[in-house]
Image (cartoon, rainbow, N blue to C red):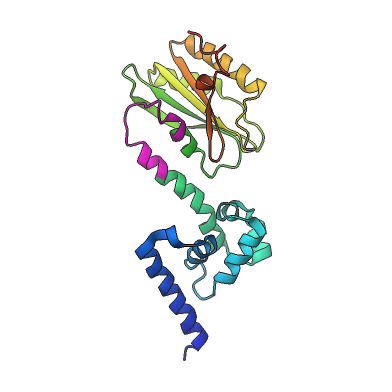
Amino acid sequence: MASSGGNEHNGRRQRQKEKFLKNSFDVFEQHEVLEMLLYYAIPRRDTNPLAHRLLERYGTFGRVCDAPFDELERDFGLSKNAVVLLKMQPQLARIYTESKINDKNFIDTETLGEVFRCKFIGRNSEAVAMILGDARGRVIFSDMIAYGSLNSTEMPIRKMVDLAIRHNAKTAYIAHNHPSGSLLPSKQDLDTTMIIYDTLYNVGVKLMDHYIVTDTKYLSLKESGMGDHIFLY
């Protein structure tokens, strides 16, 4: 025979699901979002107190998802399934957003910064992305091309050249992220961009811009004026 506490708990889960179907997450507090997500990894336990504890430790839903795997297991008793579910959320957000934006076949410089920003959702270490265009301005390549550590990554210049030649590209756009949250380019960022520009130019490909990306923002070296000495011709 089920306990009254169990019935009450099951009733709350059902009410929360109906609330979501009617209003989406617009009317949910962050702890309710986390509580409901955990339903699908913790089927027989009240996840509301756990959601509160997680947010008390990490502050936001996003930071809970980014928390260290072993910490979530050790300090909160989460199963591997529960941790995997949390870790999937930033990746799913990136895949969902990219699939919406990439419906356009032509490079749109007005939205390109946002396209690049979406490629870095959920990435906690430095990485490099590249988009190549043909003579008509169509996207012929768009992907991550390098992954680094928390603080730095080597720009894979030879790989950029190989990809550009292989795809018969005429234009190139690159981006890398700053997990620290700073949009300011370092001297190394600027020096490397100039090397990439000259190297691609020598094989008939024009580097159009280099974006620096954080979790919520992006900076175009070209439009900011910080790359005026690079994008000269």
Count of picture labels: 0
Q: Is residue 108 magenta?
A: yes
- The image shows residue 64 at horizontal and vertical percentages of 59, 56
The percent position of residue 147, horizontal first and vertical second, equals 57, 34
Q: Considering only vertical position in the picture, is 34 above or below 62?
A: below
Instruction: Give the residue at x 51% y 38%.
Output: 120
Above or below, 225 against 47 in this view is: above
Q: Residue furthest bottom?
A: 1
Most extreme residue toward the front, as rendered? 27
- Magenta-tinted stretch: 97-114
The residue sitting at 51% across, 76% down in the picture is 44
- Left or right: where 125 falls relative to 99: right
Image position of 233 with respect to 2: above or below: above
The x and y percentages for residue 174 are 50, 25
Closer to us: 207 or 169: 207
Would residue 140 be seen by someone viewing this image from the given angle?
yes
Q: Is residue 143 above or below residue 133?
A: below
Q: Is residue 78 visible?
A: no
The verdict on residue 86 being magenta is no
Residue 150 sits in quarter: top right
Residue 216, percent from left and from top = 53, 40
Residue ID at (51%, 42%): 121
